[in-house]
Amino acid sequence: MSDRAGERGSAVIELPMVLGFLIIPIAFVVLTIPTWLQDIHAANDAAAEAGRAFVLSGGDGEAVDRAIQAAELSHGRESGSLALSSVAPTAELSSAVEVSVTVEVTAIALFDFGSFSYTATHTERYPTYVRTPR
């Protein structure tokens, strides 16, 4: 009985420590990861749609901008949140174009604390019936 006498009231201290150091950080990770995936998915969609718009419009830059704006609208993002990084023909005799779109991803969603950028890249091939831009 004397061995347990020194442990009286230790649960009062252990419970807040477990909540503060284990459960709350796990909750932040569980709440933040879906927002990362949403931002990454928006960038991937914007790159794919911009690549298709570039190829099918014959190299029109305005078509690419409209495709990125449409991707922002369909994903519920603010205008200008998806930035076109590059549009460049690939080395295969201009038979494809590579489009890169960059998005700023919030590191911790609830506190708007920190961010990192993610660049999505998509390669779109020219179909045989579409003229390549010159």
Image (tube, grey):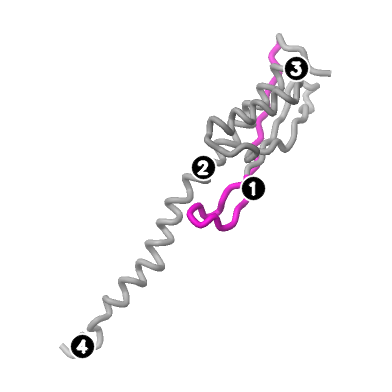
- Name the amino acid type tagged 3: Gly
Secondary structure of residue under mark 1: strand
Mark 2 vs 4, N-terminal side:
4
Q: Residue furthest bottom?
A: 2
Q: Is residue 71 magenta?
A: no
Circle 3 or circle 4, nearest the eye: 3
Q: Which residues are magenta?
A: 104-128
Residue 19, quarter of picture? bottom left
- Residue lying at 66% horizontally and 35% vertically, measured from the top left: 121
Mark 1 vs 2, N-terminal side:
2
Give the number of the disc on residue 117: 1
| Label 1 packing within 10 angstroms: few (<14), some (14-19), many (20+) | few
Residue indicated by mark 2: 37
- Name the amino acid type tagged 1: Ser
Number of labelled discs?
Answer: 4
- Name the amino acid type tagged 4: Ala
Tell me: residue 52, above or below residue 46: above
- Name the amino acid type tagged 2: Leu
